[in-house]
Image: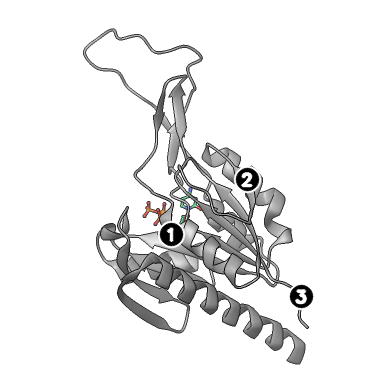
Amino acid sequence: MSKKLTFLILSGPTKEYIDPVRYISNESSGKMGLALAGYAVKKGYKVIFISGGVKKYPKRVELVKVTTALEMLKASKFNLQRADIIISVAAVADYRPAKFQKHKIKKSGNSILLKLKKNPDIVKYCGENKSDQVVVGFALETQNLLTNAKLKLKSKKLDLIVANGRDSFGYDKTTVHLMSSDSIIKIENRSKKFIAGKIIDETVRIFENIKSFKKNA
Ligand code: CTP
C-alpha cells in the first residue's frame, strides 16, 4: 500500500495590524479552505491546516493558527517538507503597515498617510522550494481571468492554479477553471464542496504522475 499523502493547506485571510486595535484585512470567508480540508480528511489523507483569522476550523486536521502573512510564511516554511501536496487558498494581504504603532493612533489632522510594505509571496516560496511535491495556488481576478491566472501559474512555479472571479468571495456556489501548463478544466456554478473534491482529486493525480515519471526516468 502506498504511503498516506499529506496535504498542507493555507487558508483564510491574514490580518496586518496598524496599531493594537486596527488592521488591514479582506473579506475571505475561508469556506474553500474548509471544503478542501474536509474532503481530504474524508479521503483518509493527513492535513496540516494553516489558517488566518476565521470563525470555523476543519476537524481532524493538524491546525496551525496564524494572524499575519509573516506568521503564515514562517509556519509554511516549517511544514513545507512534511507535505506532498501544498494548496494555498489563503487571502494573504499583499501589503502590511511599514511600521506597527505600539499605541492606538490618536485622531489629529484631516488626513494621515499610511505607508505599506510588500508582504512575501507565500505560495511562490513553496513553488520555488518544492522537491517532488505538487504546489497549487488560487487566482482571484476581476479581469482577464485566464491570462492573468496563467501568468501566476508560471511566475509562482505552480503545478495547478484555480482561477476564479470576484463572485467566489463568500458565496457557496462558484465557477472556476483548473489550469495546469497543458490543460484547462472548467467547473461551472458548483458548490465549493464539489469543487474542493475535484481539486483534491486532480492534485493527487498530478502527484501520482510526477512519481511515476520519476520512477521511469
Ligand atoms: N499568495 C501568497 N502570498 C501572497 C499573495 C498571494 O501565497 N503574498 C497566494 C494566494 O494564496 C493564491 C495566489 O497567491 O494562491 C494568488 O493570489 P492572488 O491574490 O490572486 O494574486 P496576487 O499574487 O496577490 O497578485 P494580484 O493581487 O496582483 O492579483
Residue 39 percent coordinates (x, y): 53, 68
- Secondary structure under tag 2 reads strand
In the rendered image, the quadrant that contains the N terminus is bottom right
> Which residue is disc 2 drawn over?
64
Residue closer to the observer: 125 or 102: 102
Q: Amino acid at mark 3?
A: Lys
Question: Looking at the picture, how far across and down is residue 201, in whole percent?
Answer: 53, 78
Q: Position of residue 187 (x, y in %)?
A: 34, 77
Q: Earlier in the sequence, mark 3 or mark 1?
A: 3
Residue 3 placement, left or right of 66:
right
Tell me if label 3 and label 1 are in contact, CB under 8 Å.
no
Mark number for residue 3? 3
User: Marks 2 and 3, how far apart in space?
Assistant: 23 Å
User: Which residue shows up at 29% across the image and 18% down it?
Assistant: 112
Along the line of sight, the residue nearer the viewer: 46 or 187? 46
Residue bearing the label numbered 1? 32
Kindly indicate the quadrant of the structure image that contains residue 61: bottom right
- Quadrant containing ligand 1 reads bottom left
Whether residue 157 is visible here, answered yes or no, is: no
Q: Of the residues shown, which amino acid type is indicated by label 2?
A: Val
10 Å crowding of disc 3: few (<14), some (14-19), many (20+): few
Q: Depth check: 19 or 199 in front?
A: 199
CB-based contact (under 8 Å), mark 2 and mark 3: no
> Could you tell whether 169 is left or right of 75 in the image?
left
Neighbour class for label 1 at 10 Å: few (<14), some, many (≥20)? many
Q: Residue at x 32, y 22 (%)?
A: 113
Badge 3 element: loop
